[in-house]
Image (cartoon, rainbow, N blue to C red):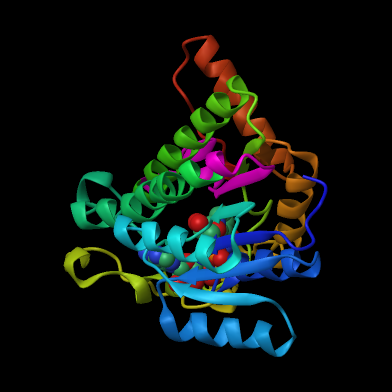
Amino acid sequence: MREFKGKTAVITGAASGIGKAIAARLLGEGMKVVLSDVEAPALDRTVNEFLAQGADVCGIEADVTHYPAMAALAEKSFARYGAVHVLVNNAGVVVPEAPNLWDVSLNTFAWHMNVHFWGVLHGIKAFMPRLVAQNQEAAVMNVVAHPGALIQSPILPAYSASKAAAASITENLHYQLRKQNSPIRAHILFPGPHTVPSNTYTASRNRPAHLAPEPHEPVPVVKSLEEMQAWCLKTYGFERPTTRAEQVAEDAFQGLVSGDYWILPSKEALDKAVVQHHEELMARRDPVLPFEML
Ligand SMILES: NC(=O)c1ccc[n+]([C@@H]2O[C@H](COP(=O)([O-])OP(=O)(O)OC[C@H]3O[C@@H](n4cnc5c(N)ncnc54)[C@H](O)[C@@H]3O)[C@@H](O)[C@H]2O)c1
């Protein structure tokens, strides 16, 4: 995609963190942005912040797990701006999970799958027919994470499974679009390479009551990046490096410009883990997770 000015982007989970940073980056290119989120007060605050800067934005409350809400988001976005050129399926959640995956409740699995798999699929189903009919250059960017989408993370099995499912539909979408020589490109965005400061530590704020955790499941003890860093220092003797959300937004923008499918900042330890896993597979050797990836 070369031209951004005057075009429209729709971003889910845009009230906060990475979604908000991507919105700011695309607004900087002169795009119009529909910010969508399930958390109405945070969405209002973010929309008002951008409006105060003179940006052409609107906020549409939508829960990605609810297909009618996503269909309405597509309907309202096209009604408001006439066309959509970039869809970023970014909404996401994470919570600490029980040490054994058989102790992770079905509710915890369902919540992750609903947001990360069904949420992304709902976005694709709600927007793709219109994007195809529009027959213009466009992009669908799905935000995943290396746990699940590249290698596994035994400390987050529900999160990993849901991101693996999102990565699968993203890659299949890519193949189908390329086969049709479509002007629409699919992108898979891995925020990073390090932890990105955001509101992810309090993701439970958006957990629906009907998918509440069971009493034995761990409750989030770390409520902010600072608390997480203090915990890492105490537990491992070092602080985790971080990547700013603005850097992720820059990577996302450059991915739109280049049209590249993989938006995956390089990280030596991750690259090595992926290669090792591939070699283990080819040799039919049991997989071993490198310590750095735990
Ligand atoms: N922060 C990181 O280090 C990191 C790393 C890898 C991947 N990611 C991914 O990046 C994406 C953005 O996360 P973030 O770190 O900016 O967190 P964040 O909590 O700051 O932002 C996530 C947004 O998604 C919204 N949301 C949650 N459930 C929703 C739902 N059902 N419907 C609509 N919106 C919903 C939240 O209200 C929030 O505004 C997520 O998909 C996350 O998995 C983040």
Q: Is residue 145 above or below residue 242?
A: above
- Residue 92 seen in render: no
User: Which residue occupies the foreground of this view, 110 or 9?
Assistant: 9
Which span is picked out in magenta? 132-157
The reply, left or right, for residue 2 in relation to residue 169 is right
Task: Look at the image and say whether residue 156 sits in the magenta stretch.
Answer: yes
User: Which residue occupies the foreground of this view, 294 or 17?
Assistant: 17
- Choose top left, top right, bottom left or bottom right for residue 175: top right
Counting from the top left corner in percent of width and height, residue 43 is at: 50, 80
Counting from the top left corner in percent of width and height, residue 231 is at: 53, 71
**Which residue is located at x 66 percent, y 85 percent?**
51
- Residue 177 seen in render: yes
Q: Is residue 11 above or below residue 118?
A: below
Q: Residue furthest top?
A: 283
**Which residue is located at x 81 percent, y 52 percent?**
3
The reply, left or right, for residue 22 in relation to residue 157 is right
- Choose top left, top right, bottom left or bottom right for residue 270: top right
Counting from the top left corner in percent of width and height, residue 273 is at: 61, 32
Q: Is residue 293 above or below residue 216?
A: above
User: Which residue occupies the foreground of this view, 110 or 239?
Assistant: 110
**Which residue is located at x 79 percent, y 69 percent?**
28
- Choose top left, top right, bottom left or bottom right for residue 184: top right
Task: Look at the image and say whether residue 34 sits in the magenta stretch.
Answer: no
The tally of labels here is 0
The quadrant of the rendering that contains the N terminus is top right
The reply, left or right, for residue 28 in relation to residue 215 is right
Counting from the top left corner in percent of width and height, residue 36 is at: 49, 69
The reply, left or right, for residue 288 in relation to residue 71 is right
